[in-house]
Image (cartoon, rainbow, N blue to C red):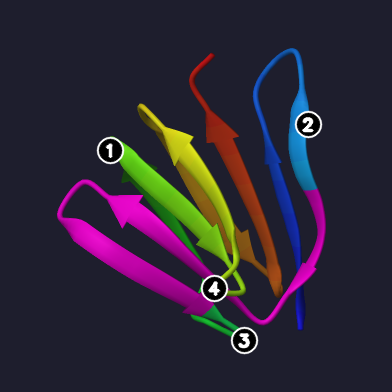
Amino acid sequence: MFKVLILNPRHTFYEGEAWSVSLPGEQGMLEILDYHHNIITLLGEGEITIDWKVHLPIRKGLAKFYHNELVVLVEE
């Protein structure tokens, strides 16, 4: 499992641990799993899915996975 934090400047949408997080990347969907390579990517409109059950629609954002921790900043 890895740490996940999804937020915007005013609100934290999700904080916890996950086995899998799917993100709507600008070039298509991507999935983050334990010990994924470090990555920084822009996100497009779509839905973030956490452990195949929590779904969060977004317009756009930025994701950073570093040292087994995912931080996602989304547009208000």
Distance CA(mark 3)–CA(mark 4): 18 Å
Q: Residues within 10 Å of mark 2 (few under 14, many from 20)?
A: few
Distance CA(mark 1)–CA(mark 4): 19 Å
Q: What element carries label 1?
A: loop
Q: Earlier in the sequence, mark 4 or mark 2?
A: 2
* Pointer 3 with pointer 2, Cβ within 8 A: no
| Residue type at the position of mark 2 | Thr
Name the residue beneath numbered marker 4: 52
Name the residue beneath numbered marker 2: 12
Report if residue 23 lies within the magenta region.
yes
| Residue type at the position of mark 1 | Gly
Q: Which of marks 3 and 2 is nearer the N terminus?
A: 2
Look at discs 3 and 2 and give the one toward the viewer.
2
Residue at position x 41%, y 73% in the image: 31
Q: Which of marks 1 and 4 is nearer the N terminus?
A: 1
Hey, which residue is sitting farthest front in the picture?
A: 53
Q: Which of marks 1 and 2 is nearer the N terminus?
A: 2
- Which one is nearer the viewer's eye here, 17 or 67? 17
* Residue 26 rendering spot, x and y as whole percentages: 21, 46
Residue at position x 63%, y 65% in the image: 66
Q: Does 70 sit left or right of 11 as displayed?
A: left
* Pointer 3 with pointer 4, Cβ within 8 A: no
Write down the region rendered in magenta.
15-32
* Residue 33 rendering spot, x and y as whole percentages: 55, 82
